[in-house]
Amino acid sequence: MEDCLFCKIIKGEIPSTKVYEDEYVYAFKDIEPVAPIHILVVPKKHISSLNEIKEDDEVLIGKIHMAIVKIAKELGIDKDGYRVINNCGKNAGQTVLHLHFHLIAGVNMGEKLI
Ligand code: 5GP
Ligand code: ZN
């Protein structure tokens, strides 16, 4: 089966602006940012959505969140704060079927969205 868009980005077959990478996680700038900082944090393993995680992925989900905090600290957004969003499925507006977390910051979102 052909790799999905984010698998191609992880492999470097489609260019991206890398922000962070480790054994489990790849993070890059969203192509259509909704805030001054908008990063996509994705597992290197292809999982199509949050619905599809298995018991074996428990560590991976923790690694993704550890990576998000590392990135937030590296970018200096940990103090002012940030939002982490996962869109799961059609009604949430998930468009890319490879699990990803949006890391959004650089603006006060107190009155917006959720
Ligand atoms: P979703 O709507 O599935 O939660 O989020 C998908 C995100 O991927 C969107 O915010 C969209 O802007 C981003 N995106 C789609 N295609 C590309 C691409 O080729 N490169 C990058 N960097 N981001 C992409
Ligand atoms: Zn994929």
Image (tube, rainbow, N blue to C red):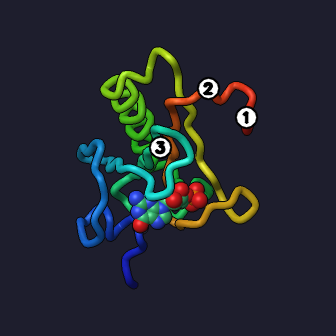
Mark 2 or 3, nearer chain start: 3
Question: Quick check: 76 left or right of 94?
Answer: left
- Front residue (pair 67, 29): 29
Q: Label 2 belongs to which residue?
A: 108
Give coordinates of residue 46: x percent, y percent.
41, 63
Q: Residues within 10 Å of mark 3 (few under 14, many from 20)?
A: many
Q: Secondary structure at mark 2?
A: loop
Question: For the point 30% across and 70% down, which residue is it?
Answer: 14
Classify residue 6 by image quadrant. bottom left
Kind of residue at badge 2: Asn
Q: Residues within 10 Å of mark 2 (few under 14, many from 20)?
A: few
- Front residue (pair 5, 30): 30
Question: For the point 48% across and 38% down, which residue is it?
Answer: 36
In the picture, which quadrant includes the C terminus? top right
Classify residue 45 by image quadrant. bottom left
Query: What distance separates the C-alpha of mark 2 from that of mark 3?
Result: 13 Å
Q: Is mark 3 within 8 Å of ligand 1?
A: yes
Which residue lies most toward the top here? 79
- Residue 71: numbered disc: none
- Front residue (pair 34, 43): 34
Q: Secondary structure at mark 1?
A: loop
Kind of residue at badge 3: His
Query: What distance separates the C-alpha of mark 1 from that of mark 2?
Result: 8 Å
Q: Residues within 10 Å of mark 1 (few under 14, many from 20)?
A: few
Q: Label 1 belongs to which residue?
A: 112
Relative to residue 51, is residue 8 depicted above or below?
below
Kind of residue at badge 1: Lys
Give coordinates of residue 9: x percent, y percent.
32, 65
Q: Label 3 belongs to which residue?
A: 38
Q: Secondary structure at mark 3?
A: strand
Mark 1 or 3, nearer chain start: 3
Question: For the point 53% across and 41% down, which residue is it?
Answer: 35
